[in-house]
């Protein structure tokens, strides 16, 4: 059910977003640009229906100030104004968190609990997530800017589903008995790695919390988790719910802080046994180097993408337009696997382009707490300016700006849904990860061409294929060098589906049974047999 909620939200939004009867052309950079069906960003904003309860770091079961006493502001992206001041963790806070996690692993009850007892705590946490669904969703929207409907109806329920999934795995992790050529009994043990360091991003704070914390706890590890500095609030709230669920002190430690200080300290810590990171490819390289230069800890990386969305010549164009729109614009375009290179067959290109432009101009942008809003603000000023910079680059490289191309309103970090046509492979908007509401539409002639062009990237996270032909779907699914291929769908994130990338999109897989391997060591135990009845 959780995997289908995002798609069902898409279907409901499409049904209510009819073209506005009062659209008038506007002129931008000399091209005709459609006016947007938006809620004005300047109108009075809804007051978030939640109180800020937790702004300190969680270390050894207690919420505490940073060792330095410093705090940093966390921002409402709707306005650019401060929501709260959060404890600014640095290397000393990471040291304290790791010490607590190490003691909890070496001496505490968590690894010594039965797997069934651990699973009951994860299930209790999932129950508490459901009980506090609206508070978590409101914090996520307030701190991140994503639509409240998306957070409350899709992402928080998915958070609970993921922890129930991993609770189910906790008592099903086991080794093997292995036959040998000699008189020995061989067994393998699957043991927790120990202290796991985890660094999560700002685009899906709660879901990334689940992707990291769920499998680590199910396998019996302890954790030091660093939040993204842009979005610390929901991880701290969730950590409090874990305390209420009965998680022993020191098992989950949460430190808020910045990458060059807290993040670097965690990645290079000599007493961290495993590291998991989600973020940009550039930062992933730094994390991997720090891990290698310290104690050579194993690292799981889920990094950037420039995913192709391929619309074949037999496509139902109306359905393809809607799905391609969702694949790119979902979550304000701030999605590592966004279908950010829309390849359209030349036979349907013109029709697709006109309908894609019309769909983008109907997209509702405004206060994400308002019902019916599809797109909120970008996360912060830096990302806002980065996206506008890519739009400028697209214009300067002679791509055709079909709609959008500018900020919306004068307050907060809202950007108009933007569509470029006549995009060429060597343009920055076709090569680099924009992480914003900018759709680049490219034309292709045949399958061999689109396979070559789709694979001509350093990334390999995901791809979308839209076709009525099973043969075409099979050909593309096997030819595309990516970790996930969605055929006639996109962004289906069931708890059991593994997720990760080829090439510079990462190392390892998250979710599903594959994620458990990230947090387990395999030990072989060899015992001689004396006069065995059988071998």
Image (cartoon, helix red, strand yellow):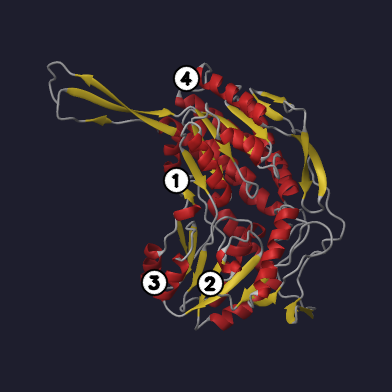
Whether residues under marks 3 and 1 lie with C-beta atoms below 8 angstroms apart, the answer is: no
First in residue order: circle 2 vs circle 4: 4
| Quarter containing the C terminus | top left
User: Viewer-nearest of labels 2 and 4?
Assistant: 2
Badge 3 is on which residue?
472
Count all numbered tags in the image, as a single digit.
Answer: 4
The label on residue 98 is none
Give the CA distance from mark 4 to mark 3: 51 Å
First in residue order: circle 3 vs circle 1: 3
Most foreground residue, 73 or 58: 73
First in residue order: circle 2 vs circle 1: 2
How many neighbours does mark 3 have within 10 angstroms: few (below 14), some (14-19), or many (20 or more)? Answer: some
Q: Does residue 429 appear to the left or right of 47 in the view shown?
A: left
Residue 169 pos. (x, y %): 44, 35
User: Viewer-nearest of labels 2 and 1?
Assistant: 2
Most foreground residue, 276 or 286: 286
First in residue order: circle 1 vs circle 4: 4
Give the CA distance from mark 2 to mark 4: 55 Å
Residue sitting at x 61%, y 77%: 421
| SS state under label 2 | loop
The label on residue 112 is 4
| SS state under label 4 | loop
Badge 2 is on which residue?
425
Q: Does residue 238 appear to the left or right of 414 in the view shown?
A: left
């Amino acid at each position: 059910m959780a995997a289908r909620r995002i798609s069902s939200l898409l279907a409901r939004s499409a049904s209510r977003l009819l073209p506005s009867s009062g659209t008038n052309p506007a002129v931008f950079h000399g091209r005709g640009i459609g006016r947007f069906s938006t809620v004005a960003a300047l109108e009075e904003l809804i007051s978030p229906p939640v109180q800020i309860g937790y702004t300190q770091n969680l270390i050894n079961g207690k919420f505490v100030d940073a060792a330095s006493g410093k705090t940093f502001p966390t921002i409402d992206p709707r306005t650019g104004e401060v929501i709260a001041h959060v404890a600014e963790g640095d290397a000393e806070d990471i040291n304290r968190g790791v010490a607590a996690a190490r003691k909890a692993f070496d001496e505490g009850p968590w690894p010594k609990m039965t797997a069934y007892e651990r699973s009951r705590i994860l299930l209790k946490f999932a129950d508490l997530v459901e009980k506090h669904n609206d508070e978590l969703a409101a914090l996520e929207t307030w701190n991140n800017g994503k639509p409240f409907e998306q957070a409350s109806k899709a992402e928080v329920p998915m958070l609970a589903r993921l922890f129930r999934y991993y609770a189910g795995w906790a008592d099903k992790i086991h080794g093997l008995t292995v036959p040998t050529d000699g008189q020995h009994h061989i067994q393998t043990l699957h043991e927790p790695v120990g202290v796991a360091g985890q660094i999560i991003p700002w685009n899906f704070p709660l879901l990334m919390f689940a992707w990291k914390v769920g499998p680590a706890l199910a396998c019996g590890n302890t954790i030091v988790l660093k939040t993204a500095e842009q979005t610390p609030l929901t991880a701290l709230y969730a950590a409090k719910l874990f305390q209420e669920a009965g998680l022993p002190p020191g098992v989950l430690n949460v430190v808020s802080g910045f990458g060059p200080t807290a993040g670097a300290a965690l990645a290079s810590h000599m007493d961290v046994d495993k590291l998991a990171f989600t973020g940009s490819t550039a930062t992933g390289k730094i994390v991997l180097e720090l891990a290698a230069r310290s104690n050579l800890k194993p690292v799981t990386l889920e990094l950037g993408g420039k995913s192709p969305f391929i619309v074949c010549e037999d496509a139902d164009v109306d359905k393809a337009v809607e799905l391609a729109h969702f694949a790119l614009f979902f979550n304000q375009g701030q999605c590592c696997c966004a279908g950010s290179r829309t390849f359209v067959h030349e036979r349907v290109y013109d029709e697709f382009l006109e309908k894609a432009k019309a769909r983008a101009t109907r997209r509702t942008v405004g206060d994400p707490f308002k019902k019916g809003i599809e797109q909120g603000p970008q996360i912060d000023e830096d990302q806002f300016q980065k996206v506008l910079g890519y739009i400028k680059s697209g214009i300067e490289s002679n791509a055709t700006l079909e709609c959008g191309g500018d900020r919306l309103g004068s307050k907060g970090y809202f950007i108009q849904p933007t569509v470029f046509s006549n995009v060429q492979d060597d343009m920055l908007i076709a090569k680099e990860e924009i992480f914003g509401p900018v759709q680049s539409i490219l034309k292709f002639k045949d399958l061999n061409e689109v396979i070559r062009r789709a694979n001509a990237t350093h990334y390999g996270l995901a791809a979308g294929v839209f076709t009525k032909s099973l043969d075409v779907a099979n050909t593309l699914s096997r030819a595309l060098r990516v970790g996930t291929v969605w055929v006639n769908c996109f962004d289906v994130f069931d708890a059991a589906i593994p997720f990760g990338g080829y090439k510079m999109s990462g190392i390892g897989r998250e979710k599903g049974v594959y994620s458990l391997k990230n947090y387990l060591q395999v030990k072989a135990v060899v015992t001689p047999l004396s006069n065995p009845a059988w071998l």
